[in-house]
Image (cartoon, grey):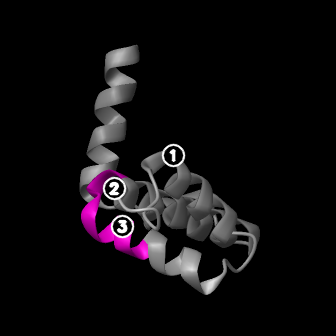
Amino acid sequence: MSHWMFHCDDVSQKISQSMDTVLPFNQRMAVWMHLLMCRYCYRFRQQLMMLRRMSRAVGNGSTCAQAEDMLSHAAKERMKKKLDASS
């Protein structure tokens, strides 16, 4: 692996960091290159973005039901199965 490529651990840290600050250009490009190749990190980023949108919606006066509408049908089904299995 080339020296400019991040590992998944590094990418998850950079994704989280990018929620609070703007990453330097070279780091943003390295993260995006990794995201193009790694579906797991891409999915992690999507999940963080969803949580951010839902948190902002609830923080802006939306109800939990309105925030729940942001979830895809597949995500709701996965959550329901997990909850049913844990009962």
User: How many residues crowd around disc 3 within 10 Å: few (fewer than 14), some, or many (20 or more)?
Assistant: some
* Mark identifier at residue 35: 3
Q: Which residues are magenta?
A: 32-40
Q: CA distance from mark 1 to mark 2?
A: 14 Å
Of residue 20 and residue 61, the one placed in the foreground of this image is 20
Question: Residue 44's x, y, as percent?
Answer: 43, 54
Q: Is residue 79 magenta?
A: no
Classify mark 1: helix, strand or loop.
Answer: helix
Q: Are marks 3 and 2 in contact (CB under 8 Å)?
A: no
Q: Nearer the viewer, residue 71 or 3?
A: 3
Distance from Cα at disc 3 to Cα at disc 1? 12 Å
Amino acid type at mark 3:
Leu
- Per the image, label 2 sits on a secondary structure element best described as loop
Residue for badge 1: 9
Q: Main secondary structure of the magenta part?
A: helix
Observer-nearest residue: 26 or 43?
A: 26
Can you give x and y, in whole percent of width and height, for residue 55 in the image?
66, 63
Identified at 66% across, 81% down, the residue is 24
